[in-house]
Amino acid sequence: MSTKLALLKSGDNVIADIKELISEEKICGYLFNRPHVVEYRVPVVLSEDKDYKQPSSRDLEVALIPWILFTEEEKVPVRTDWIVTIVEPTPAVKEMYEEKVNGQNSQTDS
């Protein structure tokens, strides 16, 4: 695989370089390389201007946080029964992740 976004049973959205672990021609798990949780929130803005529109879900603030904070391991195996789905991340989130793990950008908010 490649850089993908996995939704886990725990509700975490994890972005990583994801590879299939295959045994006897069957997928038995996935290997997440440099996994990060994608956290987001809609910014709240207070304004007395009655024509001001509050930010929508399209104006999300996104942060990438290492998935398991207290380990130095970069490759984490994940059982298939913990994966709800694996999808292609949006281009902006994928670019943010790749910049972060490649050390090109220390900024994590977008």
Image (cartoon, rainbow, N blue to C red):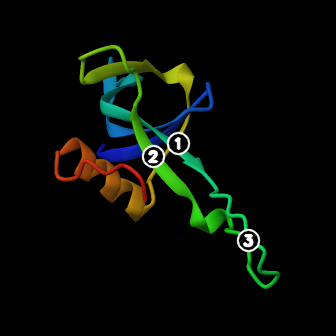
Direction from residue 62 to residue 76 in the image, left or right: left
Q: Which badge, 3 or 1, comes first in the chain's sequence?
A: 1
Q: Which badge, 2 or 3, comes first in the chain's sequence?
A: 3
Give the secondary structure at mark 2: strand
At label 1, counting other C-alpha atoms closer than 10 Å, the crowd grade (few under 14, some 14-19, many 20 or more) is some
- Alpha carbons under labels 3 and 1: distance apart: 25 Å
Amino acid type for the residue under numbered disc 1? Glu
Q: Which badge, 1 or 2, comes first in the chain's sequence?
A: 1
- Compared with residue 39, is residue 95 higher up or lower down, i.e. above or below? below
Residue that numbered label 1 is attached to: 39
Residue that numbered label 2 is attached to: 63
Give the secondary structure at mark 1: strand
> In what quadrant of the picture does the N terminus appear?
top left
At label 2, counting other C-alpha atoms closer than 10 Å, the crowd grade (few under 14, some 14-19, many 20 or more) is some
- Alpha carbons under labels 2 and 3: distance apart: 25 Å
- Alpha carbons under labels 1 and 2: distance apart: 5 Å
Residue that numbered label 3 is attached to: 47
Q: Residue furthest front?
A: 48
> In what quadrant of the picture does the C terminus appear?
bottom left
* Coordinates of residue 5 in the picture (x, y in percent): 45, 44
Amino acid type for the residue under numbered disc 3? Ser
At label 3, counting other C-alpha atoms closer than 10 Å, the crowd grade (few under 14, some 14-19, many 20 or more) is few
- Compared with residue 107, is residue 51 higher up or lower down, i.e. above or below? below
Do tag 1 and tag 2 residues touch (Cβ < 8 Å)? yes
